[in-house]
Amino acid sequence: MFNKILVANRGEIAVRILRACRELGIPSVAVYSEADRSALHVRYADEAYLLGPAPSRESYLRADKIIEIARKCGADAIHPGYGFLAEREAFAAACLEAGITFIGPKPSAIASMGDKMTARNTVMAAGVPVVPGTEGTGAMRDEELLAEAPKIGFPLLIKATAGGGGKGMREVTSLAEMPALLASARREAESSFGDGNVYLEKLVEGARHIEIQILADQHGNAIHLGERDCSIQRRHQKLIEEAPSPFMDRELRQRMGTVAVRAAQSVDYVNAGTIEFLVDKDKNFYFLEMNTRLQVEHPVTEVVTGVDIVAEQIRIARGRQLSYKQEDLVIRGHAIECRVNAEDPYNGFTPSTGRITHSLLPTGPGVRVDTGVYPGFEITPYYDPLIAKLIVWGETRGQAILRMRRALEEYRIVGVRTNIPFHQTMMDSHRFMGGQYDTRFVEERFAMPEPGDERETHHSEIAAVFATLVAHHATERAAQFVMRNERDTSNWKWVGRWERLHR
Amino acid sequence: MFNKILVANRGEIAVRILRACRELGIPSVAVYSEADRSALHVRYADEAYLLGPAPSRESYLRADKIIEIARKCGADAIHPGYGFLAEREAFAAACLEAGITFIGPKPSAIASMGDKMTARNTVMAAGVPVVPGTEGTGAMRDEELLAEAPKIGFPLLIKATAGGGGKGMREVTSLAEMPALLASARREAESSFGDGNVYLEKLVEGARHIEIQILADQHGNAIHLGERDCSIQRRHQKLIEEAPSPFMDRELRQRMGTVAVRAAQSVDYVNAGTIEFLVDKDKNFYFLEMNTRLQVEHPVTEVVTGVDIVAEQIRIARGRQLSYKQEDLVIRGHAIECRVNAEDPYNGFTPSTGRITHSLLPTGPGVRVDTGVYPGFEITPYYDPLIAKLIVWGETRGQAILRMRRALEEYRIVGVRTNIPFHQTMMDSHRFMGGQYDTRFVEERFAMPEPGDERETHHSEIAAVFATLVAHHATERAAQFVMRNERDTSNWKWVGRWERLHR
Amino acid sequence: MKYITTINEKEFAVDIMDDHHVSVNDKVFEVDFESVSGQPVYSMLIDGQSYEAYVYAGEDEWQVLLLGQQYPVRVEDEREKRLKSSIGGKVQESGEFQLKAPMPGLVVAIPVSEGQQIEKGQVLILLESMKMQNELKSPRAGKVERLKVKAGESVEQRQVLLSIL
Amino acid sequence: MKYITTINEKEFAVDIMDDHHVSVNDKVFEVDFESVSGQPVYSMLIDGQSYEAYVYAGEDEWQVLLLGQQYPVRVEDEREKRLKSSIGGKVQESGEFQLKAPMPGLVVAIPVSEGQQIEKGQVLILLESMKMQNELKSPRAGKVERLKVKAGESVEQRQVLLSIL
């Protein structure tokens, strides 16, 4: 086993990895920015070291510091999680040079899959279908891209060459608007990845985003753990994932699984990875990209297969054989994950920051929560808005949806706005229940409920009573306060609200 | 489906049942005592009605009021949970008379299994082995019992005829101490069940407590869901349960399962029930009693079988057929449950009460928590000390133990003492890891760690630093406070501590 | 105590009769209301129905989060109400619009300059927060005045960035 | 600031040198210490090792719950300490033992009566709490005095029930 594993990440995924280390009995090391001193990953780790100021560039992206800390504290392996340094070839290479195991694929695999165009060419060569788009001609200037665009046809997508997670991505419906969008895409790509290069890709309409989780060891064994349907997205950010996909059948799963394994093998992939596909309504599928790391949504696969993917990553990195053969894997029931973000769905999903003052996690049968926050923790604007992943299991998809509704209703977070109401509305939507959705569903066919209907009018009456009672008490208590009735400590609470009300 | 289900219980089990109702889309009704106005079951239910003052006799045991409330609010079914009215024949009967479905067995079955002696005779007739003890001669006077005792032989147990959960139970090693123990047993039985009758039973030494979960519908179908090992007990109170039992083999499981189903059928049992057995080291098993209700520890069975036992109870009560056949049931992996009680393991497990000021639930892969409390909730002395059930799943028993360790370490509860340290010590004990334990293990072979060893000395040094820093700050802040530095609100906190320190 | 409570133009006449009775538009309800563990989370049993809501003071209204729905609620006692209507209309009405940062973040770019004439919907400022770029647009046509920030500057939530006249 | 900190007879000389350095028996550690979300839960990074403990004031000692182990800790600054030793021994020592309720509950029975001579370990009171009967025994032989409760009475935690002289 490893003597010590350093987790080069923060938030829920750092906690997830620390848990795996603990369960394998391996001492763990956390690194943190000044903004994260009391973050959960610092509290849970066996050791913790400061990286630097809050901005990622000065902390979680400081590869040099991280490797130095690993050396100093005697960590012989580093788990990068997702984001930050997870898909940086240079970092993986630097770890190897420092004699530290990078828990992930070889630098070469990261490189060839990391550059979207190289990736396309590599998998095409392996006979994997890809989405039409600008070929691997490296960095292209705007003029060239503008010339290429009509040949691909509109609508199309501008994507960051070094990108992922929808950052630096723009959708183009006409040549006219393209220059402006190129500029903003390059700007966002630059600020997110330090690389402003972009490429074009045909937009497959009515497409579903379906990805295959794969595991490969250092002995040439590679298996797939079935698919995840991640079609519920907004601005190309995944919001809900499920496994299995309601759109999938055994035959298609097998075909896509085989192709995915082939794609991975085309770069001698080792460790856990995910092949993302677009699938059109006729079940033609196109390779989109490979994520050479742990996915945010890995838990839905864990829940239906019983495989602990992170534990398996660590075993693989140690040179062990896969604990499973393809035929061992049985998919049991159905899993759904909702990403709970600090975003206000009633306000164009604007990020919300602040201190979580009160929080109640949903628990009970079939519910799993992966989170990095707790009551009293401050949500800062420095990092991504994901505060928790709510995962449910059900014997059937129907049961899973009902359970998710139950869990969402139980979930209480006070202090920041969250997108929980969005998820609740989604779970109630007939199209979602029917599995009738594609990657454009949220943007084109989905809306938060408008007040007005039956149920609504009743509830607004209830809301009116709530607000009136609170206002009434606030006034009364404030009055008492003026009368200096200081014995009753509850006054303080009320006064607090009174002041907020009138600030 | 039912129009509305009333849950005649409180705490974690009320919440568990409300969740099942919500997931089945059935409106739910909570009842509560004055002590429970802001309890979780009141917060989660669709409707909630006050029963009366805190003492159970005036609230949760008020069958009449509960049925009246059900009538008034239009609930057509009542789920009793466990404890309180769950095993009262009269209550089940009263529900039927009121035209309300009692989610549980027929009154007749409760009656024959509820009276331990009738139960023994019934199952013996059905060819189920029982533990030697006083035969079904109804209520016996002390003289008679004292006369019987030597024939059974010591050690033996005094048990409450109407009892369960170790209440009114005493262990007797000699005739001399028996009179005093009879008196206290009767007293406790009287105060717990309103019935002071007791009987005697041979104490099977080196015994394991293994129980079989069964499900039976109204159409004569009956299946078992495998066993739970509940041998980790203290004062006959279960503390840890696991499924499957490390002591079990397929052959024994089949035999005990078949016997359990036969025992249930001997009283035309319907709905969920549990047959408790004592199993000696030679794998002879004896019928102990049948619990004609949902068990506290039902989740470990749910986790390994994937069956939602509470949802199944409701379906059965509606007259549906069982959703499973015996051959459908597959046991996957291993589950362990730790009962987290408000008891101080460093202080003879004395009950601890108070307000939970801070709490952090363990979450993440393979962890389930069933609880009825939350930060800010007050633990009162009126009800049993169970505040949460921590359940983990692992592919193997080993993984489950490691995961439980991880979860226990994550669990934070501030405001009341809990027995979490007890569970942590247990998970570290070699005998538990080896599955080498019986029902006497906790009382005879188990002790909380004494300071002194390597690890300990290091940790007491750490503890010394913690205490010194806190004391140091407390003094400093208090000093500042005297200087009326009121801008710094954090003072208030510190002063609070300072005052506590010197009260 | 009588209040006029308004949720998107819909008015409710709410009368808090005593600790356990409230009437809404003259319909009387039995109410048991309390704060959960000293937080702005409230549990209310209204004629037996159990509801829970998160109620907090917003900019100039109360915000109620109930069953995943958010309700902006204005609560005025009758006297206040009459007063207001006599003055006529909102006092907040004014010729100047102040663009405030909807969230803390980093000003990435300012495509407009002071004194510039702009149209409704035109992008005024690009604000990056939580790694997403957010375009802050003008709610109406006008002239850019009092530009208070520079590109590259970090801003607090609700900080005034510029004004439209 | 120098302290003498004692855990079950074991003494530690703890010197709080500055905000980030502490020495224990002259061994210096780098320390980053803070309270988690304003609770008596503390996170400490000591030479990089991350520890968390729940620290609260007990009757006359600090209680530290660390990694599932509970430590009763006495913290005295050197001056205090010297003072004490000059007086010599605990002040609490006294001929009278007061039996206090270890938890809130209901007095079920009082098998002894005022003035009665009793032995060490003899049951003085039966207290029911959380549905369990608890026998409160005498820590030493003596005479029952000042019986302050009756059977059937509810008592608060730490309420004095009777005295042994």
Image (cartoon, coloured by chain):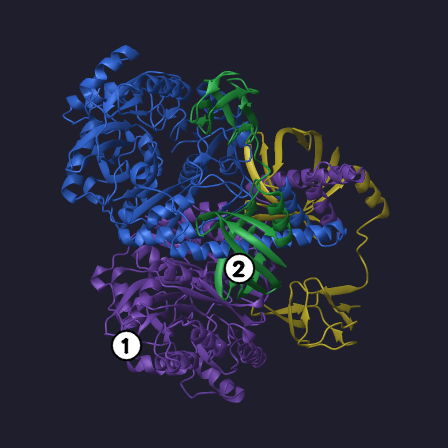
Chain colours: A purple, B blue, C yellow, D green
Q: Residue at x 67, y 72 (%)?
A: C125
Query: Which quadrant, please, contains the C terminus of chain B?
Result: top right
- Say if residue A417 shows up in the picture: no
> Is residue B265 toward the left or the right of residue A332 in the image?
left
Q: On residue A265, which mark appears?
A: 1
Closer-to-camera residue (A408/B169): B169
Residue denoted by label 2: D44
**How far across and how far down the image is residue C24, in percent?**
67, 33
Compared to A322, does B363 lie above or below? above
Disc 2 is attached to a residue of which chain? D
Q: Tell me where residue B295 sits by quadrant.
A: top left
The reply to whether dot 2 and dot 1 touch (C-beta < 8 Å) is no
- Say if residue D105 shows up in the picture: yes
Q: Residue at x 69, y 39 (%)?
A: A489
The disc labelled 1 sits on which kind of residue?
Gln
Compared to B24, does D124 lie above or below? above
Mark 2 vs mark 1: in front: 2
Q: Secondary structure at mark 2?
A: strand
How would you rate the neighbour count of disc 2 (Cα within 10 Å): few for under 14, some for 14-19, many for 20 or more?
many
- Find the distance from the CA under tag 2 to the CA under tag 1: 46 Å
